[in-house]
Image (cartoon, grey):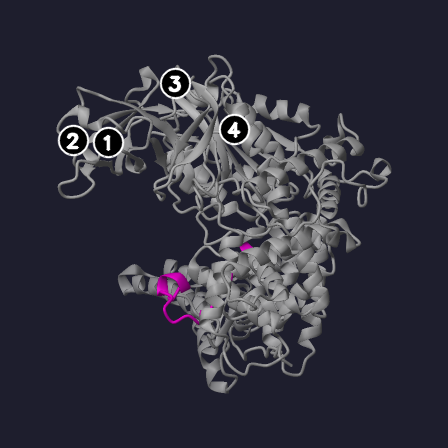
Amino acid sequence: MALPGGDSVVTVRDTASADFTEAAVVWGSTELDAVLLKADRSLVGAGMGVARWGELVCDYPDRRPVCSMTGFPRAMRRQASVGSEQYVDDLKTVEGTIAPPTGSRSRLYALEVDGAVPTHVRNWQGLSGAGVFCNGILIGLVRLVDRQWDRTLMVLPLSHLLAAHGFTEAVAAHTGISPRLEPADLRPLMDNPPDPKLSSTYLLDPRSQVTELTGVSELVQRIEQWCKGTDRLDVAAVTGLGGTGKSRLVTEVLHRLTTTLGNQRPWSGGFLADSPSRTDYQVLATASYPLLLAVDLAETRLPQVRDLMAALAGSHDGAAVRVLLLARGHGTWWLSLRRHLQTRNVGPLGHSFTLTPDDALDDHSPEDIYVEAKVAFARRIRLLQQAGHGDDTWPDRVVADAPRLYGAGIEHAAPQPVIYHHIAALADVLSHANPEFALNDHPMEVLLANEVEYVRRVAEARLPEGTVDDELLRTLVTAQFLAGARTAQEGRAAVRAGFDAHHRGYGITAPPDARQLAALDGVLTAAYPATDGAHWGAAGEPLAAAWLTEIEDESGEEFIETFLQHDSLATEQRHQALSTVARAAQDQPGLAAGAHRAVAANPERLLPLAAQTVTTELGIDYARQWLTGLEHAVADRATDPDSDPETYEWASSLISEAQERTAADRDDLEDLGVPLTPEVVDDPEQSDAETGADAPSVDSPFVLVKPRVGRLTRTAITFLALCHLVLVAAVPSGVALTSNIGDDGWSLWFFVAINVFMHLTVASAFGGRQLSTIPLSWIIPLFTIGMTTLSGLMLDQHWPLELPPPWLVWPVLFAPGLAALTYAWRIWFGQLQARRPATLEDPSG
């Protein structure tokens, strides 16, 4: 037994081992009756994940999470064998729920136990000190059993440990990570920090907090002041180029707000998950602590942001909530979202923050950033190696003063985002430890080589010996980055699409082996586990974008085009892939061409998604470039003999409308992003609810086409159509008013409704559909004009026209009006035209 103030070395064993091993006491507190031990990871806790520290922050009765603990209560003591005098303290797992207000005055959690409990309180003895977990996060230690409430265990929250002298420093010294309390009960809604691993993705992840935040101290203070405002709910945007440190900035603000200072109430929060395992955001409105929620890539997640704010703008009984939207630029999305939120009385919405590349250099030179980053990377890598990550293949030791190979002359470098200085520093540290990495010309290539090594280690542990293909793994990691996967089914789809795109050009002799694809899926899931509710995570954007560029170049610029058109991908995966390519193409313009060709090859499936991505997620200038590229690609594809003219006329019209709206800087751009037809899914097990069975499929024989017209033309034709309807209704109304009601003149009022109905019917039939050109199809409009002309002749008997013959005047008025009404219908509602499917090029050649 380890006691605070006792021996510095004790013997321990974990639940999976029968052997004891030595552990050293690195911290202890007599007041809290707790010690922190350090032992050989291979002997104690092998295979266990990284411990996460947390707390309960909300009180939402319908969503109280189940907490669990495992210990050795006296009631579980058993005889070793029949007739034996030896006894074994066996394990007992206890589950229950915590109602946060209970026990709050004593600053303890009160866990109400579910199920059977011992008959006497002394039988709980032995459970004291057990860790209490909620959603996989450690939230406290069992302190005592309440003698008055036999189903209640009092739990010491971890906030007591983090506030104790020396605890945080001890944890950071031995793990390289400073502990921070996460909202354990909100974990299904949050995107959690990544688990430590010896990969370039982890080392560069801003939430890993490997490097210190430099500069931006004034901006951090401004955001802190905004958070501590008096409003119950507020939203602000943080914009900046990729790599300028937006996520790291928010992580630092969270760290400061969640650190208890005196009697100030600490904050909680984190990054909102893109694919949460549940979407009941109402729980956030019951927070006991103020919350700071960050939404990364907010411009790509506007529907989710609206859902979040709709839940928070209603009943709100909890503490203040602040939402930070991280994006590369304001564009039109922020103005549109602000208008939307203002109509729902969400906060003042008066703040936005901009992060520039120079902000990180506010009080640091590029040389300072580079040197400090080398020290931080070297220290974290050594700690990862001590924890069992990596292997013994690196010939040299990791050192902070590694020679400058990629960081040479950095003190004279041109201003650039801080991420590039970190990349150079990490490349020098890695290339010194493994000279093979130094054979690469660019620092990013060094980081990619280390990432390949990391993925290979994961693959070798899960694939048969001799079957690991580095090139295939690289392609699949890129496919994982492009498409994502919220579910296991989407994971299978991404693996299949990446596998086929990797082997394009060789034809299909046999389908890939299902067991092989499943094993590859397992490798990707293990290498990049999900930090939210999705099926898996992904490699970091700087690395994965560089890999994407390499693969696209090596494939002759065919990989993106092939991947986007693969039939197995779900609609949301295609949308994410287009969005990812669009972001990456801002730094690597060559990536856009493949996406443009893919959209042009299959506009019915991809163009609505591309329009939504371009018009809502990109800045105005860059959106115009993308639309121009799409316009050229569609025009080139339309010249192919096998292309369908009507389909490409519709595609050209949609692109022109997007260009018009973008040029006018309008905020209704999302209307363009509604796909005209949903996905055709080749998985027969997928439910109708997932595929949208009520909507027409991509194989529908019709396509909805709207004519491409300017704003002035649209306004003029609509005005003429409305004038025509007024005239059609006015003429029979005049006849009815001038007739004698006693002579059954009242029946003439039916002609008003009949005339209007017939004209609208002709407009909808001829404007909304393609009809046969045989003469019979024109009988209805001619009959309609004749009926209205008859009303005009009847009116002429009471009010004679001093003009040419009325039988000629009325048709001349009604025929153009009916034509204008028909075309107005087509402009506003579109026309269903018969479709001849566009021919896709066979990627296998």
Q: Quadrant of residue 133?
A: top left
Q: Secondary structure at mark 3?
A: loop
Label 2 with label 1: CB-CB less than 8 Å:
yes
Q: Secondary structure at mark 2?
A: loop
Q: Which mark is residue 709?
A: none
Tell which circle, 2 or 1, labels the residue nearer the N-terminal end: 1
Which residue matches tag 3?
32
In contact (CB < 8 Å): disc 1 and disc 4: no
Q: Residue at x 74, y 48 (%)?
A: 431
Q: Which residue is mark 1?
A: 73
Magenta highlight range = 671-693
Q: Residue type at mark 2? A: Pro
Is tag 1's residue or tag 3's residue first in the polypeptide sequence? 3
Spatial distance from mark 1 to mark 4, Cα to Cα? Answer: 28 Å
Determine contact: label 2, label 3, CB under 8 Å.
no
Measured Cα–Cα span from mark 4 to mark 3: 16 Å
Q: Earlier in the sequence, mark 2 or mark 3?
A: 3
State the residue at coordinates (76%, 25%). Answer: 363
Res. 816 visible in picture: no
* Mark 2 → mark 3, Cα distance in angstroms: 26 Å
Query: Disc 1 vs disc 4: which is toward the camera?
Result: 1
Residue receiving disc 4: 171
- Report how far apart the C-alphas of labels 2 and 1 lie in the structure: 9 Å
Closer-to-camera residue (433/701): 433
In this view, the residue in front, 800 or 111, is 111
Question: Is 26 on the left or on the right of 225, as rendered?
Answer: left
The residue shown at (44%, 33%) is: 22
Which numbered dot is residue 118? 2
